[in-house]
Image (spheres, rainbow, N blue to C red):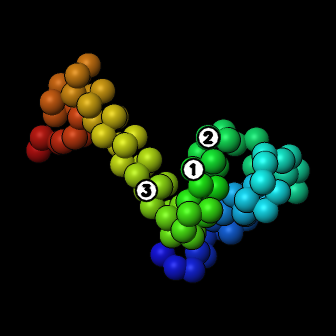
Amino acid sequence: MYPPRAFDSTMYFLTSAKVYVQSHRLVVTPYLRLPVLPQLNEMFFTLSLLLYDDIAAQVIQLLLLTTLAAALIAFCRRNFSKQAGWCQRQF
């Protein structure tokens, strides 16, 4: 996890959060790869960089991923079947 080596962390996610922290506001970042990604996620990264460091930003992303996975499982179990939520195969 440390130091971040993935291209998306070093080229966009942590970079844009660092730009926001340094400028103390939302700014247009036309030189970054994806300058129009939803800003709420970036504000979570910015807050974690203000309070701690880039590991906290990665933990926030992991928590968002697990929340999305849990919501997807719950949706499938509610609208289809209990097995569809876990994508189980019957052999």
> Could you tell which of marks 3 and 2 lies nearer the N-terminus?
2
**Are there few (<14), some (14-19), or many (20+) residues within 10 Å of tag 2?**
few
**Tags 3 and 2 touching, CB below 8 Å:** no
Q: Measured along the vertical axis of the image, is residue 71 above or below residue 53?
A: above
Left or right of 78 on screen, residue 61: right
**Three-letter code, disc 2:** Leu
SS category of the residue bearing label 1: helix
Q: Name the residue under label 3.
A: 62
Q: How far apart are marks 3 and 2 (CA)?
A: 15 Å
Q: Name the residue under label 2.
A: 40
Say the numbered circle drawn on residue 44: 1
Q: Nearest the camera: 6 or 36?
A: 36
Left or right of 11 on screen, residue 82: left
Residue 77 in the image: x percent, y percent?
21, 28
**Three-letter code, disc 1:** Phe
Left or right of 80 on screen, residue 24: right
- The picture quadrant where one finds residue 73 is top left
**Are there few (<14), some (14-19), or many (20+) residues within 10 Å of tag 3?**
few
**Are there few (<14), some (14-19), or many (20+) residues within 10 Å of tag 1?**
some
Question: Residue placed at 66% from the left, 63% from the top?
Answer: 14
> Could you tell which of marks 3 and 1 lies nearer the N-terminus?
1
Q: Distance between the residues labelled 1 and 2?
A: 7 Å
Does residue 15 appear anywhere in the picture? yes
Left or right of 30 on screen, residue 64: left
**Tags 1 and 2 touching, CB below 8 Å:** yes
Q: Measured along the vertical axis of the image, is residue 18 above or below residue 80?
A: below
